[in-house]
Amino acid sequence: DLGSISTTLPKAMANSLWNNRVVFYEGCAAQVFFFVFLVGTEYFLLTVMSYDRYVAICKPLHYGSLLGSRACAQMAAAAWGSGFLDAVLHTASTFSLPLCQGNAVDQFFCEIPQILKLSCSDTYLREVGALVFSFSLGFGCFVFIVFSYVQIFRAVLRMPSEQGRHKAFSMCLPHLAVVSMFSSTAMFTYLKPPSISSPSLDLVVSFLYSVVPPAVNPLIYSMRNQELKHAVSKIFGYMLLQNQ
């Protein structure tokens, strides 16, 4: 989360403060690589986390054997490795295209769809093919997450203990909220019809999927921490007393 938001936001803030919209070609390529790498890795890790919750709730007696330290390390390495390969594929495909429609990216960071608009070569189909491959992979992860949560909710609803159901929901809902926010904003960005596309809408939606989820994720996960909840309630209580 920290890496992905640091890839886009500091440069955009600096350009805004100094009224400068210049991004060097090498810097644009680096931004595309690290953004795709970190965002892709996060999505793969969210998929792994859904499997973790599925095993913890649906197969608790097998948790130690299915998700030991070795298995966790292998799944984490697969997520990071897949994100890296995806980033290399997209960066190489995008920046091998000849750009002849100017050099102005109509976005606050170097986003692949905006760069493709600058290409006038038929070779852009290579990058479109890479995008289709990534979306197919992402859709497969999405289906896996949905399937995992269908099984999870079926198991939770069969629990006789209300405390057990509350504990299971408190473990799953933050992760589900992050997945929903991330998936919905990203899908809308890349799958919205051209008829409703506009520079202002593209800017807002890109901000939603590239900045909001990484900024909100730590807060969503941290709200399970009882000490943090207690500290936040004390702060709000103090603020209310001060206002009174």
Image: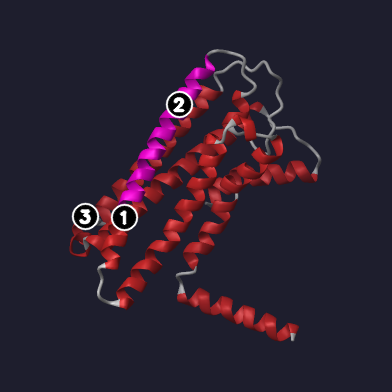
Residue 109: x %, y % from top left = 65, 37
Numbered tag placed on residue 184 in the rendering: none
Query: In front: 136, or 224?
Result: 136
Residue 236: x %, y % from top left = 63, 78
- Callout 3 secondary element: helix
Q: Which residue is mark 3?
A: 66
State the separation of the CA atoms marked 3 and 2. Answer: 33 Å
Q: Residue at x 25, y 56 (%)?
A: 67
Q: Earlier in the sequence, mark 3 or mark 1?
A: 3
Residue 56: x %, y % from top left = 27, 62
Residues marked 3 and 2 touching at CB (< 8 Å): no
Q: Earlier in the sequence, mark 1 or mark 2?
A: 2
Query: In front: 188, or 238?
Result: 188
Total marks in image: 3
Q: Residues within 10 Å of mark 1 (few under 14, many from 20)?
A: few
Q: Earlier in the sequence, mark 3 or mark 2?
A: 3
Numbered tag placed on residue 130 in the rendering: 2
Q: Is residue 89 left or right of residue 56?
A: right
Query: In front: 201, or 106?
Result: 201
The reply to whether residue 52 is in sight is: yes
Q: Amino acid at mark 3?
A: Leu
Query: In front: 174, or 32?
Result: 174
Q: Residue at x 80, y 42 (%)?
A: 18
Q: Which residue is mark 1?
A: 150
Residue range highlighted in magenta: 123-149
Residue 27: x %, y % from top left = 63, 32
Residues marked 1 and 2 touching at CB (< 8 Å): no
Q: Amino acid at mark 2?
A: Ala
Q: Residues within 10 Å of mark 2 (few under 14, many from 20)?
A: some
Q: Is residue 124 left or right of residue 22?
A: left
**Is residue 8 shown above or below 119?**
below
